[in-house]
Image (tube, rainbow, N blue to C red):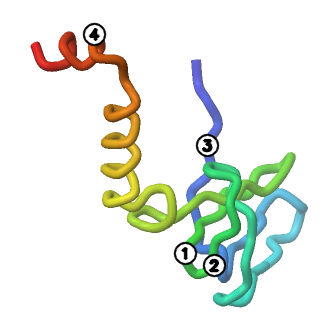
């Protein structure tokens, strides 16, 4: 089975190749745009775009927004802190 994927491009300037002629599109770097990964507004300079024939998907760039290693570590710590005592004992094994 083959799943069609498109390369990620910076949100400040990407090319849409699915409309016949390639179209160069971009957003100003300091513009806030909603991301599809965390549903939050992020600066365009911190986002990447995947342009498909049926839509454009915006994601946080690696090491930015919800993909920032510090944010990921904080989320894991918060999830662990919210676990029950039994779950924490099983996790410690």
Spatial CA distance of label 4 from label 1 is 39 Å
Q: Name the element at disc 3.
A: loop
Question: Any mark on residue 46, and which?
Answer: 1
Identify which residue, 36 or 54, lies in the foreground: 36
> Mark 2–mark 1 contact, CB under 8 Å?
yes
Identify which residue, 39 or 74, lies in the foreground: 74
Q: Position of residue 91 (x, y in %)?
A: 20, 18
> Mark 4–mark 1 contact, CB under 8 Å?
no
Give the side of residue 20 with respect to residue 5, left or right.
right
Q: Which residue is mark 2?
A: 43
Spatial CA distance of label 2 from label 3 is 24 Å
Q: In the rendered view of the protein, which quadrant contains the C terminus?
A: top left
Q: Which residue is mark 4?
A: 86
| Mark 3 / mark 1, whichever is N-terminal | 3
- Circle 2 or circle 4, nearest the eye: 4
Q: Which residue is mark 3?
A: 5
Spatial CA distance of label 2 from label 1 is 5 Å
| Residue located 73% across and 78% down the image | 32
- Circle 3 or circle 1, nearest the eye: 1
| Mark 2 / mark 4, whichever is N-terminal | 2
Q: Is residue 28 above or below residue 91?
A: below
């Amino acid at each position: 089975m083959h799943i069609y994927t498109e390369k990620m491009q910076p949100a400040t300037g990407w090319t849409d190749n699915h409309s016949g002629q390639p179209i160069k599109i971009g957003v100003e770097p300091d513009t806030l745009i909603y991301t599809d990964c965390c549903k939050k507004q992020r600066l365009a300079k911190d986002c990447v775009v995947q342009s498909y024939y049926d839509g454009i998907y915006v994601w946080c760039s690696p090491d930015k927004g919800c993909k920032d290693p510090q944010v990921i570590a904080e989320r894991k710590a918060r999830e662990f802190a919210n676990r029950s005592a039994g779950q924490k004992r099983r996790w410690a094994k």
